[in-house]
Amino acid sequence: MELEAFCRKLPKVELHAHLNGSLSHSTMLQLKRYHADSGLTDNTDAFFDEFQIAAGDTRNLKQCFQVFRIAHSLTTTPEALTLATHLTLQEFQDDGCCYIELRSTPRDTPHMTKKQYIEAIILAMLHTPANMTIISRLIVSIDRRFNFAEAQEITDLVIEFHKLYSSVVVGIEISGDPSVGKFQTFVPLLENAKNAGLKVTLHCGEVCNPDEVQEMLDFNPNRIGHGTCILPRLGGNDATWNTLCIKKTPVEVCLTSNVNTKSIANYESHHFKELFDAGIPIIICTDDKGVFATSLSQEYRLCAETFKLDNSQLAQLSHRACLYIFDETSRKTVLDKLEHFITHNDL
Ligand code: 6MZ
């Protein structure tokens, strides 16, 4: 089977996808139509075409955080969030994704509170259209810009919703502009979330900050995102790299995101290779498929082409990723699907 078709057919899990960064052009158009039909204003006209940071774009990681405002102006009501969630889940499903942990940062808007924001996504995941088979779970995000009180408000909500909907709300994470805020601010809150049964994933080492990387790894998160500046050659140091090698913390790897934001010079110099060789669990993810003009199957294809992996190795990557999904009750279902695919395709 040709590589592109194989990558699409391979059952995959997506564990690092920000909802508002995952909106496709077509989803944004539908959200614009919804806003117009509902008499709501959005401010996307002037910069609608600036949402995508595709290959060759001159913007860097810092500038990338401005584009999310465009998506945010299209997800201001519970109905719009429901639509955005359903359309995004459908696109992942069409791309061969069978399990997804979508993440999103609750926002107060003129039309909903943070609590309503979280509830809208939970309900959208519980009440998917009839043709939808993808299993979807929610990780609630805390933006590094938040002060302690704002982050506490969100953590309390996540814990409350986890009690009510433990089958949907599975985790909490820290994201946002990595040059802003301090990880230590959020540690007591993350401990509370952990104690309440939530899993934790952290954006770790997206920029060079070895002290913070070390603090994050020492916190023992269930997974980390990116893990870019952990290797000495990428701005980490021997201690950060050795800690990762010993702890074997699973890394959500987002190839195109790292290249398009210029965190990594090109695919060939991506740290995937060192992670792979060191036996550190890797989960191939998209990060923001709308912003970076990618898809989960495309990320698998790029990985295969760059690091010379055959179909069997790709299937093993996907299989191993299933071990790190936060919803333990879905793990067997997802693993069975993958094992069936591996057996039937003689891999
Ligand atoms: C860190 C990122 C990110 O939460 O509104 N986000 N945080 N690094 C990245 N790498 C490029 N990409 C996205 O989705 C958009 C939000 O996700 C975070 C940012 O906080 C962004 O505002 P939600 O659904």
Image: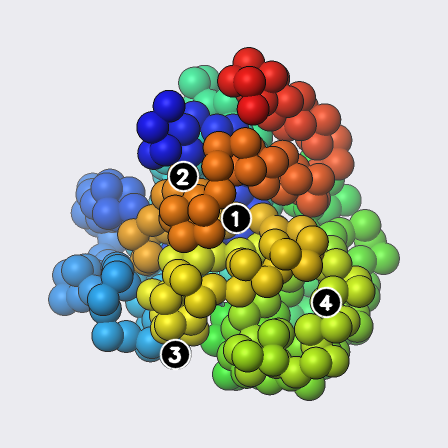
Q: Nearer the viewer, mark 1 or mark 3?
A: 1
- Rounded to the nearest angstrom, the CA distance separating label 2 from label 1 is 9 Å
- Rounded to the nearest angstrom, the CA distance separating label 2 from label 4 is 27 Å
Secondary structure under badge 4?
A: helix
If you read the primary sequence from the N terminus, does the residue marked by circle 1 or circle 3 appear first?
3
Residue 258 on image: x %, y %: 43, 65
- Rounded to the nearest angstrom, the CA distance separating label 4 from label 1 is 18 Å
Label ID, residue 244:
4
Which residue corresponds to mark 3?
A: 62
Q: Nearer the viewer, residue 103 or 296?
A: 296
Which residue corresponds to mark 1?
A: 284
Q: From what the image shows, is residue 139 above or below residue 327?
A: below
Which color scheme is applied? rainbow
Q: Are marks 2 and 4 in contact (CB under 8 Å)?
A: no
User: Residue at position x 25%, y 53% from top?
Assistant: 40
- Rounded to the nearest angstrom, the CA distance separating label 3 from label 4 is 26 Å
Q: Three-letter amino acid code at disc 2?
A: Ser
User: Residue at position x 45%, y 46% from top?
Assistant: 308
If you read the primary sequence from the N terminus, does the residue marked by circle 4 or circle 1 appear first?
4
- Rounded to the nearest angstrom, the CA distance separating label 1 from label 3 is 23 Å
User: Residue at position x 85%, y 57% from top?
Assistant: 195
If you read the primary sequence from the N terminus, does the residue marked by circle 2 or circle 4 appear first?
4
Residue 29 on image: x %, y %: 21, 45
Image side of residue 308 versus residue 298, left or right: right
Image side of residue 328 versus residue 3, left or right: right
Q: Nearer the viewer, mark 3 or mark 4?
A: 4
If you read the primary sequence from the N terminus, does the residue marked by circle 3 or circle 4 appear first?
3
Residue 107 on image: x %, y %: 49, 62
Q: Three-letter amino acid code at disc 3?
A: Lys
If you read the primary sequence from the N terminus, does the residue marked by circle 2 or circle 3 appear first?
3
Secondary structure under badge 1?
A: strand
